[in-house]
Image: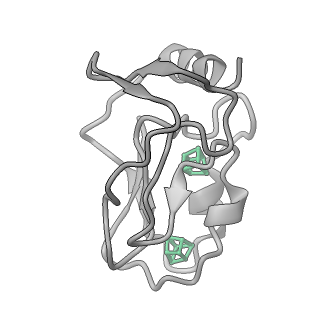
């Protein structure tokens, strides 16, 4: 499943550069599928909707760092463990129960992001 950042985040910024999918954003910053990925044109989201990869979207959080679930692969295909959780000094990067995914699904997501 995707990882999420809880409100215990102290905004240290350590996790952001570690994400292989550019799924982590500072609070208040707009996100896009194409940031740090190879995706161009229309992208199909996990819920079946489609958005343009370059479309800039409203921040998930304005106060603390946040993770875009559609871009988080739990680091599958890159690292043995979620890198954000590995570097977070306050252990606030935790599994997001809203997004239950198998390793196979996470690998498919990785392949979609880095074609
Ligand atoms: Fe990025 Fe990996 Fe953290 Fe997901 S688990 S947000 S892919 S660093
Ligand atoms: Fe927040 Fe942890 Fe990321 Fe630092 S490493 S910005 S505390 S989630």
Q: Nearer the viewer, residue 45 or 84?
A: 45
Question: Measured from the top left, where is residue 47 in percent x and y?
Answer: 26, 22
Q: Nearer the viewer, residue 107 or 34?
A: 34
What count of labels does the image hold? 0
Q: Nearer the viewer, residue 91 or 13?
A: 13
> Looking at the image, is 78 positioned above or below residue 57?
above
**Residue at left offset 41%, top offset 35%:** 1
Which picture quadrant has residue 98?
top left
Question: Could you tell whether 79 is left or right of 54 in the image?
Answer: right
Q: The C terminus lies in which quarter of the figure?
A: top right
**Residue at left offset 62%, top offset 26%:** 39
> Looking at the image, is 6 positioned above or below residue 9?
above
Question: Measured from the top left, where is residue 94 in percent x and y?
Answer: 41, 56
**Residue at left offset 74%, top offset 40%:** 79
Question: Measured from the top left, where is residue 11 in percent x and y?
Answer: 49, 82
Question: Could you tell whether 52 is left or right of 82 in the image?
Answer: left
Question: Measured from the top left, where is residue 110 in percent x and y?
Answer: 62, 25
**Furthest-right residue in this view:** 78
Question: Could you tell whether 78 is left or right of 81 in the image?
Answer: right
Looking at the image, what colour scheme do you see?
one colour
> Looking at the image, is 51 positioned above or below residue 82?
above
**Residue at left offset 33%, top offset 29%:** 100
């Amino acid at each position: 499943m995707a990882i999420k950042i809880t409100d215990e985040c102290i905004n240290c910024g350590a996790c952001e550069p570690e994400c292989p999918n550019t799924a982590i954003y500072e609070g208040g910053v707009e996100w896009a599928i194409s940031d740090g990925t190879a995706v161009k044109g229309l992208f199909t989201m996990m819920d079946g909707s489609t958005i343009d990869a370059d479309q800039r979207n409203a921040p998930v959080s304005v106060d603390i760092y946040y993770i875009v679930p559609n871009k988080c692969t739990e680091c599958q295909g890159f690292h043995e463990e979620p890198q954000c959780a590995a570097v977070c000094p306050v252990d606030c990067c935790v599994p997001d129960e809203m997004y239950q995914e198998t390793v196979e699904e996470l690998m498919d997501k990785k392949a979609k992001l880095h074609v």
